Image (cartoon, rainbow, N blue to C red):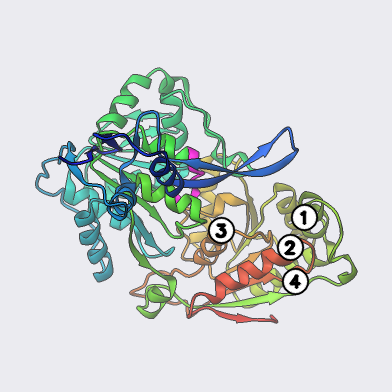
Amino acid sequence: MSDFEILIDNTWTYLKPKIKVPYELLRRIEAEMSYTREEYSSFRKITVELEISMFERNQMRYPTGLYSVLDKILTECRYTFDIIDVRNVPSIKSSIPMHSKKLRDYQEEVVEKSIKAERGVIKIATGGGKTVIAAAIVSRLNLKTLFVVYSVDLLEQTANEFEDMFHIKVGKIGGGHCDIKQINVCTVQTLHSAFDLKYTAIDDENMFKEKISKYVLERKEEIRKVVEEAEVVICDECHRCVANIYIQMAQLWSNSYFRFSLSATPFRDKSIDKVLDAYSGKLICNVSASYLIDRGYLVPPDIYILDPNEHRKYKFVRKSFRNIYEHWIVHNDLRNKMIVDSVLRLLELGKSTLVTVTRISHGEIISEMLDKAGVKSVAFMKGEINSEIRKNLLDKVRNKELKVIVGTVICDEGIDLPALDSAIMAGGGKSLIRSLQRVGRTLRPYPSAENNEKEKAIIVDFYDRLRYLTGHSKKRIKIYESEPRFSVYKHF
């Protein structure tokens, strides 16, 4: 007789012991299925790291994606076990025809690998066509599908792209819509509202705090049914996940046999990596920017690192990060003047430029300085601008009518702007995700890979020699240098 039965369903795997389980074994399982999460302690007035185990001892269960962890532990400890798989494998019908898009060879390979793997993380660098890959997966499975996005802009953009490729109506859930079909695109915020879950925006800015319309709220039961009956779930921009938000979502789609998470840069730290493993699956592919540059699908960037700091005696200033950021990034006149001078030089070179900032106040300062410098073809994009105005601005960039965009985090994801051929990283920061996304905005060939007029992109970044900021600058430079086809220089 075996020591354990292991019961597997789509979301959870249950450990059913037939023996008395040693405490040491339970502790090891809990430890190896743990991740760390940062939380602000109101008592200690600091951010602390908490260790959270995904093994729920009271129910003796853990996320199915961590099955290999348990298998390894039980095998090493010489326990025997029987596996009972109660998952219903959906019957795949004939494919939905795809129009207007022919897959590249690597895209075809990724689609085949993904369907074979049945669940996992698909990492494709910005410009590699992850939406096309997702559409091809949806097309070939032809099942009840839920595609989850993080903003209303991405909902509209993804639904439109799917409809262009499939020539069928695609459901939209969020942004005032609740039009349900076999294939549905849904915002994270609407999904949370339908299940009465708390959603906390990830960024300082409120762009992801979608206002849920009364019409959508009145149809909660219908939305819940869509989520619970979905056989395929694809989570876009999975790197945006705060661990507990992703866990809340992943536990809702209990009927989904096929689960995929998409990103240009999915891995932010070991904790979210483990959460993605647990609820989505292992990494299926990793198509880098350098690979796409070598194949002619992206253009190479020249990255120039400028040093704006003339106050080296302040390197060890004992102030909070927020205070330092406000004084030496947002309100640093010398640094901001270097940003404006860089824009002017890029305009002389005939470049269309994206100036990225983190704080709205910083964007307002730079926009005002550009106006005083005589730059008229400029727009400031921030979350509070409505979607119609944003669409008009982006169309002007695509048509080369607008030469400069100052943008907050709203420009980090899901915006296809091949007309951009330069970027200035005005906001600093340590995020691997944002750095690569912002560079990636400029690397798409223009107007297309087949008829490219763009030879390379120009990126301007800063090496800020101050407490906290120095470490952030080093991290960004390390990220750039990790791509073989990115050229990094010290002067512009």
Q: Earlier in the sequence, mark 1 or mark 2?
A: 1
Q: Specify the label residue 341 is tagged with.
A: 4
In the depicted structure, whether residue 124 falls above or below residue 240: below
Tell me if mark 1 has few (under 14), some (14-19) or many (20+) residues whose alpha carbon lies within 10 angstroms of its own.
Answer: many
Cα–Cα span, label 1 and label 3:
17 Å
The residue under label 2 is 469
In the depicted structure, whether residue 187 falls above or below residue 419: above
- Which of the two discs, 1 and 4, sits closer to the camera? 1
- Picture coordinates of residue 457, whole percent (x, y): 53, 75
Say what amino acid the circle numbered 4 marks: Asp
Cα–Cα span, label 1 and label 4:
21 Å
* Quadrant for the N terminus in the image: top left
Tell me if mark 3 has few (under 14), some (14-19) or many (20+) residues whose alpha carbon lies within 10 angstroms of its own.
Answer: many
In the depicted structure, whether residue 195 falls above or below residue 355: above
- Picture coordinates of residue 323, whole percent (x, y): 82, 50
**Can I make out residue 330 in this image?**
yes
- Which of the two discs, 4 and 3, sits closer to the camera? 3
* Quadrant for the C terminus in the image: bottom right
The residue under label 3 is 434
Q: Specify the label residue 325 is tagged with.
A: 1
Q: For mark 3, give the secondary structure.
A: helix
Residue drawn at (70%, 82%) of the image? 491
What span is colored magenta in the figure?
237-244
Say what amino acid the circle numbered 2 marks: Leu
- Which of the two discs, 4 and 2, sits closer to the camera? 2
Cα–Cα span, label 4 and label 3:
23 Å
Tell me if mark 4 has few (under 14), some (14-19) or many (20+) residues whose alpha carbon lies within 10 angstroms of its own.
Answer: some
